[in-house]
Amino acid sequence: MTEPKQPDSGSESGPKSGKGSEQAPDHLGHRKRLRQRFMTGGPDALADYEMLEMVLFSAIPRGDVKPLAKSLLKRFGSFAEVISASPERLAEVKGIGEAGIVAIKLVREASLRLMQQQIIDRPVLSNWQSLVDYCRASMAFSPIEHFRILFLDRKNVLIADEEQQRGTVSHTPVYPREVVKRALELGASSLIMVHNHPSNDHTPSTADVKITQQVEDAAKSLGIELHDHLIITRDQHTSFKSLGLL
């Protein structure tokens, strides 16, 4: 006797139970409703955990991902901190898996690439807020200090964005000679120093002020201008120029 044809398990509508009159699992309807809300109301129509659910849909095609999304937010605190967390820290959350980690990190890398396109090959000083937003997205949520240099040409157009050093939770070694050497290699006329404070304290330390002065002196001797030094935290930023330290 010919066996009845089974539903395609790859379809998002999913297999129904043995009774043909029963509805598909509720999580499928939930996914559809979230997608519809996003399409009609945009991202503002969704809570952070619902945005995370949508990120996880492609990585976890079946099952309810709401508990996982809420676990991630509880662990890291916000949507921004979830997508900025390292793969190692994400893997500590039960149920995430490699596919989920890839989906989350892809969101961050895509957003950084979009932000970078908004400042690359453009005059940085007239596009300052976009620059600050990019630096915050790329550095603010890191648990260790990162020190990067933005190299500019004669028209103050960004020609290179490079991380020079990584440090500890409170210190990053900076070598003025290496900074200036790299500026000469790139043919940069000016530069902007940027580093983050994982402590979320945006106040410049004595060491921050000292190294800024050292880099400024080394650069000036070779005709290279230090436009600014930015300290980036999760909530705000500090400009050395605005403080009168440059």
Image: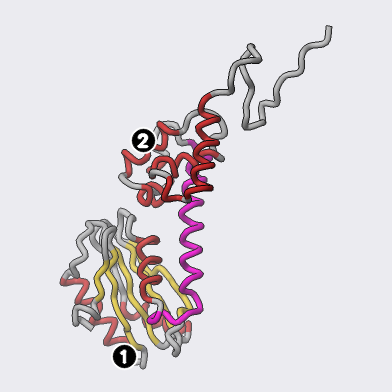
Residue 134 in the image: x percent, y percent? 40, 66
Residue 228 in the image: x percent, y percent? 30, 79
Q: Which of the two discs, 1 and 2, labels the residue nearer the N terminus?
A: 2
Front residue of 233 and 195: 233
Q: Is residue 149 above or below residue 168?
A: below
Front residue of 33 and 124: 33
Q: CA distance from mark 1 to mark 2?
A: 51 Å
Front residue of 153 and 6: 6
Give the labeled residue for mark 1: 220
The residue drawn where x is 25% and y is 63% is: 171
Q: Is residue 207 above or below residue 44?
A: below
Say which amino acid is labelled 1: Lys
Q: Quadrant of residue 234?
A: bottom left
Q: Specify the quadrant that holds the N terminus.
A: top right
Residue furthest out toward the left: 206
Q: Secondary structure at mark 1?
A: helix
Q: Is residue 73 left or right of residue 169?
A: right
Q: Which residues are magenta?
A: 97-126
Give the labeled residue for mark 2: 71
